Every structure is written in structure tokens, then in C-alpha cells.
Image: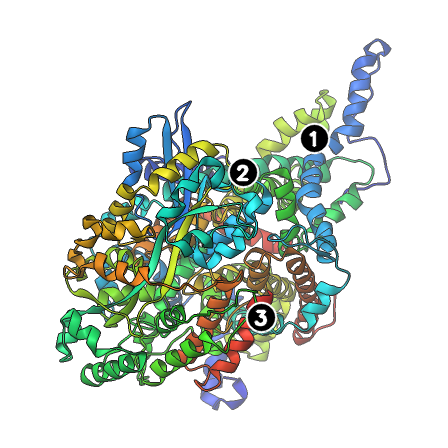
Amino acid sequence: MVSVTSLPEAPGTERPPARKRSWRHRLLRFDLHYTPYLLIAPFFLLFLVFGLFPTIFNGVVAFRNWRLDDPEHAGWAGWDNFAKLLSDSDFWNALYNTFGIFALSTIPQLFLAIVIASVLNRRLRAQTFFRVGALMPYITPVTASTLVFDVVFARDNGIANWVLQVLGYHPDTPLDWHATKLSSWIAIATMVNWKWTGYNALLYLSAMQSIPRDVYEAAALDGAGPWRTLWRITVPMIRPVVIFTVVLSTIGGLQLFTEPMLFEQNPQAATGGAGGQWQTIAQLIYKVGWKNLNLGYAAAMSWALFLIIVIIAAANALITNRLGGGRSK
Amino acid sequence: MKRLMTRSLRATAVGALALVLVAACSGKSTQTESKGDVTLKINFWGDFGLTQLKPKYEASHPGIKIVLNSGEYNAQHEDLQKKLVAGSGAADIAAIDEGFIVQFRSQADKFVNLLDYGAGKYQDKYLGWKWKQSLSADGKTQIGLGTDVGGQAMCYRTDLFAAAGLPTDRDKVSALWKTWDDFIAVGKQYTAKTGKKFVDNATNVFNPVLAQQPVGFYDSSENLQMDGGPKIAFDASVNTIKAGLSANLASFSAGWDQGFVNGSFAVLACPAWMLGHIKDTAPGTSGKWDIAAIPGGGGNWGGSFLTVPKQGKHVKEAYDLLEWLIQPEQQIEIFKEVGNLPSQPALYKDPAILDFKNPFFNNAPVGQIFSGTAEGLQPQYLGKKAGPTRVAVENVLNQIQSGQVKPDDGWADAIKEADKAAKA
Amino acid sequence: MSSETMTAPARRRVRARATGRAPQDTRAGLWSYLWLLILLAFSAFPLYWMFVIATSTEEAVSKSPPVLLPGGHLLTNIEEVFSLQDVYFTASLINSAIVAVTVTVSQLFFCSLAGFAFAKLRFRGSRALLLMVVLTLTIPNQLGVVALYIVMGKLGWNGTLLAVIAPGLVSAFGVFYMRQFILTSVPDELVEAARVDGATTMRVYWSVVLPAIRPALAVLGLLTFVATWNDFQWPLITLGGTDFPTSMVALSDLASGNYVLYRRVLSGALIATLPLLITLFVGGRQIVRGIMEGAVKN
């Protein structure tokens, strides 16, 4: 860590002895004192303008009437936007969908990732091949992969329905994946799982490899098999990373946008299905802001989403920590 | 370390190279523009038949380049609204559908008043109601000149009709369905015989029926009126669904387009502007379609205007192009190419339209069919929120079709959703 | 399966297998390979399917059972995608390349600069400032998106590439990642030695730090390139509806245009994915490393 107490000497800088080179001396002093600020300035400046300011300004917009189709109708709205939010059935529906998809994607995804990581953690030929292979979904644009899954989950002649048929499921009419909440959630969760399982597996693998070997020797004395060892020893040992991925998945999962957007029959609609079966909050924010052109209300929704993310991420981290069976660190 | 760096550098380089190659192979770049040229951008959706006219105009007007920007129907209108408020970025010429024209004519100050450029001389050439649709409330500003009107007809597949033992001759088919109840009865016959679906989607029953009502979603004082026309149209749609006639393919979706290719439905309500879509989507079905009268008779569904947003840099040149586009010669060419029916009644008497037979549609006399429906029209007033309201009600119908809403509960839902859309 | 429910011989077998070796010393068996290969097939399938449809006719797409082998129409389909007047596919690829390259180069430069300052230089408030960097990592970008649109509107940048590039020029993650890497991989002695020779701070950065952090630059560069290329939501908001999209926005246009044909949509998807597949093919090792290192450091 960088220490703040001992200023301003940097390691190994002796003052130039000669007074006659005072301009140079001054230059060096300037360099020592102020160059660090110059180095970090670009980051903070850009962050200020395009990160911090919009975040704060968003709070202002949330309390104003701000319509793109009616600029005259401006001014302070007080808590109107937030009050509207509480009674807006679209918002609660979107929240419900977001959590539904989130649960269907995060839990199986992280579980599967742990299992994959444990296999990758063995002594393996073609290690790099498998690891890079696991990342294929990660580098594929969500836009592109979602469009493929659209074809896979098509009602007529979709390959998912064909597989169901092969497996012996013969409904009277082909399953319309877009029609119900559950089926559309499963389709979208499949896309999310496909994309992130390999990535999470690599995170776990990395943590698993830093577990000291002697930990396992103790386990062997208990006679635990590999499966038991995985859940009793390995997973608790990598708990920090598990918590990290849970938080990461929460932040990502609650902001899910591209998949629900492009799962739509007409991707421009942003309604998340005819009855909003799979409309997520991020999608609703987009619709309210840039389709209904009501930016003030959209800003209020973003704040609500942010609050929810913070609460859920904290809660999940806590729960995961408890489930890991341990004290907090 | 060095190796790592070189490797990733190579990765990036190869990636970039691949890009450039792909881009280069595709040939023409859209951004070529030499100095002194005026570039005019036209925003529209679907097929306005401009592709063929663009080189013509460019050839006769050196120094003018035209950029055609077609997008999704709703998105184009939303985008125009955003750009008008932002004060920049709108196209030089923006097409507006009649479903959105009220919304935009109430912001007439953001458009060039075409009367200032002498468009007044065209007033007599237009269908009276079409001219008024894009006129501001005080009658002083004309924001757009009409392109097409959406006179209605019913397209049907002769081969599929023959297979179901139904008549294929267009007059006989027209006689089969005087009313929408007849239409549903014919559909039942078809479905019973073939086991296949009859219409693409119940929304494509809803829209033509609604277009035939004297009052649509909104009355002329902008009140949502669900119990009049919308109720009649909704009931007809629900009856269609209950009879099991709908293939439940969302309009303008990939599944719908595939339906054209696969013959998943036998009829499709087609305003004039729909012809171009069928032709472009399923060229393989050429000659298998024909066009009969619409049940219930008449009605206008859709049709557009070309406007010049004030913020454009080349307003004069834009107007010149617009004026050229609405001249009879061009309007007739568009009609022949994509089927869009002009909104200037004098043209309906023009032999070029009157005698035109469309080979794709089994040589149907499309000029006669559509101009006949367009002239006697009593058009509806379309409210400011007519566009979004339509989408909301269509969504309820889609939910009924996918079994998520009971047909008998649908109407209550439709009222609720329409109300929400009206207030959004 | 838990060992309590096992029969005695089974338990003995398990014990015999588990000889106290850590998993990383246990050789993977046939099942492990089989299991990994199945997963790999699952990972690759959507990409393969994309290719199959991109090479097919529309009729072939609607066959049941599905046609599982590629057809011979790739070039026709690709040509159609590029010739669609309303999608601007060519321009979109160039735009995406411009955005991704600019953002990547800028991030490498600015993040390594700031990372260097935080790791090796002493200045008042550095600790608090670093804490700020870390805190900003936790703000979801969703929060500022409405206001960012308004800001860009005031700047007149909406609908231009600037609106997409500017917010990506730096990232808190990049600064933090660079700082961690420099902290451990650039020895203090080297910095001191350079100082003794009278090197200025920039000189130290240029000739001591930069050469030492090349691997980290490679990793950050690749990750940034991939993330920027794939970004969808913000480009859609600011560039949607213009004739100047990025390739991801153009893809969504392709899927919502007037004539949505699967073979066309997926040919477009294939082209937009290709640069990334090549990146993975050549730089996969570094991306894997970057992600795994990131996990430990975070």
C-alpha cells in the first residue's frame, strides 16, 4: 500500500547539490510533487464528467418532469416520479421478472461453474484448450448469441422444440417459448447461463489453484471422496471468490438488458413480450426513457434499481458467507 | 513477457485486419461525398419505392446525393421526436405515418411550412382528407405532403385456396366474404379441410376492421373511445381466434416472414403498402397470390407523408426533392414498383394506374382495386397517441392467441392497456 | 451421493481413490474428459448453429427435423447483409473498430499512468483517491444512463461516435488492475535507480514501468477490446436510429428491420462475431490469464 504519511520524498531522490541548477531543481521538485496528480488527472477528469456527474445529475432528473416529447412541460416534480413508481404495475412486473430470471440463471450457473472448475483443476492434458474453450461464450457478443438463441427457441421449427420432441415430449401445439413467464424466463436464463458459466468456472479454478496442498491431506484421512472434498474443503476455501461472483452476478443479473431486448419478436418494442412476460427493469427503463420519452420517470426507476441492487448484493454476499458455514472474515 | 506482448499484438492486428478486409470486400462505402455536394437524407420505414428513384434524381441533379435510411416503423417516429426536441440530427426529409401525424402536426413550428415554398398549389390535387391530415390545427402550416394511402383489400393464396376446395377467382372469392362473419366462416371451412391456419394474426383482422369504423381509438377531441370502433374490431378478432384461424405470427417478425415463405397462412389483409413486403419477403411465391375485396368494404389503413424538419441544413434542396417525389410520374413508378397507392385522385384515372396489372399477384388489376377503395373514403381522426394505443391493444390480442389471456377477459385488458398507453 | 449411504466395499473403493492428493495432482480420468467435451460442445453449439444458418437458405431453416450441416449460401447471405440499404453494416463494422481501438489504446495509456502513480508514487491524498477509484467500481452504469444521455445531448454528441468513445476512455477497473500489477511486478529498486540517474517521473514510466507491465497491458487491452466491441445498451441509446451505428446496434436493426430473415440476421451476427473469435484464437491464453489473475487480485 502507498503510504500517505511520509511526504514528499519518493524513493531514491537526492536533491541536486548545486544551487546554480536551481531551475532544474525546481523542475524536479515540481515533478515530484505534482506529476502524480497529472498522471491520475485524466482518469478523474473523465470520470468526473462521464461518470460521477451523470450519476448525481440523474438524481436531479428523477425529481423533475423531463419529457423528450414535451420540453415545455418541465420543472420540479417533487416525489411524483417515485410515487408513480410505487403504483406502477409495469414496474413491479418487471421487478418480478428480473428476479425470476436472476434466480433461474445465477444459481445453476454458479453451481455448474464450481463443478466444472473442479474438473479443470485436475491434472489435465490440453489444459489451455479447455480453458480457452470455456471462454468462447464469454467473448461472443450477447447480441449475436441472443439472435442465435432466438432461432433455437422459435415456436415453429425451433431446435429446442425439436429436442423436446426427440426426448418424448409431444404437445398438441409446439411450445411457444415466448408465451408464458416461465418458458420465456427459462429461455433467457439459458442464454445467461451459457454466457457466464465458463467465465465463473475460470474464476473458481484460479482460486482453487491457490489452495495449499496440505489442506487436502487432512481430508484424505477422513476418507472423503472427491465430491465430498469439493463441497467440504474446496468450496469453503474459495469462499471469498464465491462471494465475489455472487455479487458480480447480482449486479449483472439485475441489469439484464440485451437478452430480453433481442428475445422480442420485434426487438424495437422493448415490451418484453405481448404481456410483458419477460420485461426486465433495465428494459423498462429503456422503454420509459427512450420509447415513451419520459426521462424523468426513467431516472427515478434507475435509482430504484440501484437501491435494489445494493440491497440484494449485500444480502446475497451475507447469505453466501453464512452458507459457506463460516465466520465472516 | 516479450512473447506475450507480441502474441496479443498479433491478435489485435489480425482482428483489425480481418475487419478491414471484410469491410473492403463488401465494396461501396456509404460515406463517400465529395466537396460541394449536398447530401439529403430521407428517413422512412419499410419500402417507399425510393431505391429506383434515387439514381434518377441524382443523375438529373448533379451535386445532390441522396441517402436512404429505412428503419423500424415505431423506432423511426420515436427517433424523429427525439431529434426534434434535441434540435439537431433529424433527416432532411422525414416520412411520417398517418398514425403519428397528429402528434407531429401539433409541433408544426419544428417543420418547414411547405406552403412557404409554394406547396399550396398541390392542395387541389390531393384527396381532401389527406391534405388536412398533415395541416396544423390553425390551418396555416402544412408540414407534409402525402405519399400513399392505404386502401384496403384482401390478399389470398390461390394455390392454398384450390387445395382447400375454395374458389380461386378473385370475384368469386370477394363474393364469399361480404362481411367479416362470412370471412370467419370461410376460414373455418379452410381450416377444417386442410388443418392449417387461415390468417397470419388476429391483429391483421383487428386493424382493417378498425379502419372501417367511423371513429377509431380517439374522437376528434382526443378522448379515448374504446366502446365504439375498437370494440367492434376487437370482437371480430376474438371470434377469429376462437374459431382457431390464427397462425399467431407477430407482424413484421422473423416468424411472420418465414410464414410467407412456408405458406403458414392463406390470407392477409393487405393495404396497398403491404404488396411490396410480400413481394420482397417471399419472391418464391410469385403468381400464387391474388387480391380480392376486403370484407366489410373500404377503410383506410396507413399511408404516409413526407416532411422537412426545420433543423435541416439544406431545407430548400430537401423541398425540391420532396416536390419531385410527389409528381405524378414518380408516384406512378412507386406504385408499379412496390404497390403504394398515390393520394392524388387524378392519378386513379391515369391509364398507367388504371390498367396496371401486378404479375406477382396473378395479374390482379391492383390499380383498379385500390383506387376504388380510396376515393369514397371517410377517414377517421387519428389521435396523438393512436400509434402506441394500437400497439397496446395488439399485444392483448397476441396474449389471447398464445393462451395467456382468456378470450372473454381480453376486452377488459384491452381497455386497461389502451388507457395506459394513452397516458404514457 | 454421500458416503454415509454407501455400502462398505464402495466406501473402501472411494478411500482407495482418495489418496490425500490435491485435485491438481490427481490425473483427470476418462469421465472428466468426456464431461468437459460435452460442455465444450454446448459452448460451441450456438456458434456452430449461427454458422449453419448463415450458410443456409430460408427454406432450410424451417425444416423439421433441423438441417444440422452447413449449406453453400454463405456468400450470398453475406452479400445481402452488406447490400441492405437500411442497416449500414459496412459503416457499423468500421465504427465498431474505431470505437474499440480508440477506447483500448486510451485505457491502456491512462490506466497504466494512473496505476503507476497509485502504486509507486507518493502524493498527498493518494489513499483517499484510490479508495474513490475502488468505490466507483461498484456503481452500476445503469444508474447514470439517463443523465449521460442528457449530458451528451448538451454536448451535441448524441448520435456520434464521441458519445460512445468518451465514457470508455478510462475505467476504474483498469486503473485498479494496473495498480495491482505494477505494485508487485515493478521492483522499487528499479524505480529508485532510475531516480538516482535523474530520470523524471514520465521517464521512469516510459523506460522502467512500461516494459515491465507488457503482459498486463496485453490482458487489459484484450479484455477492453472485447467488452467495448460487445457493448450494446449505451450505443443503442445514443446511436439507435441513426445511419451511423456500431455493429451491435446494426445487428439489432438487422433483426428488427422490414425483412427479417434468419439466415440474414445470423450472417450478420457471424461477421460481427468473427473479429472476437480471431482474438480468442490468437490471444486466448492471455485472456484466460487475465480473468484468472483478476479473480485472485479482487
User: The residue tagged with tag 1: helix, strand or loop?
Assistant: helix
Q: What's under tag 1, amino acid-wise? A: Val
Looking at numbered disc 2 in the image, what kind of residue is underneath it?
A: Gln
| In the depicted structure, whether residue B121 falls above or below residue A290 | above
Residues at discs 2 and 1 in contact (Cβ within 8 Å): no
Residue B95 can be seen in this image: yes
The residue located at (46%, 39%) in the rendering is B92
Query: Which residue appears at 55% of the width and 47% of the height?
Result: B108
**Does residue B291 appear to the left or right of B297 in the view shown?**
left
How far is the residue under mark 2 from the one under mark 1?
57 Å
Graded by Cα atoms within 10 Å as few (under 14), some (14 to 19) or many (20 or more), the crowding at tag 3 reads few
On the rendered structure, is C179 left or right of B130?
right
Q: Chain of mark 3?
A: B
Q: Which mark is residue C191?
A: 1
Determine if marks 2 and 1 fall on one subunit. Answer: no
Point 67% across, 39% down: residue: A46
Label 1 chain ID:
C
Percent from the top left, x then y, of residue A120? 47, 63
The reply to whether label 2 and label 3 mark residues of one chain is yes
Q: In this rendering, is residue C124 above or below B177?
A: above
Q: Quadrant of residue A264?
A: bottom left
What numbered label is drawn on residue B311?
2
Image spot of residue B171 (x, y percent): 16, 71
Discs 2/1, front? 2
**Separation of disc 2 and disc 3 at Cα?**
32 Å
**Which of the 4 image quadrants contains residue A45?**
top right
Q: Where is residue B26 shown, x and y percent of the image?
A: 30, 39
| Quadrant location, the C terminus of chain B | bottom right
Residue at the top extreme, as displayed: A20
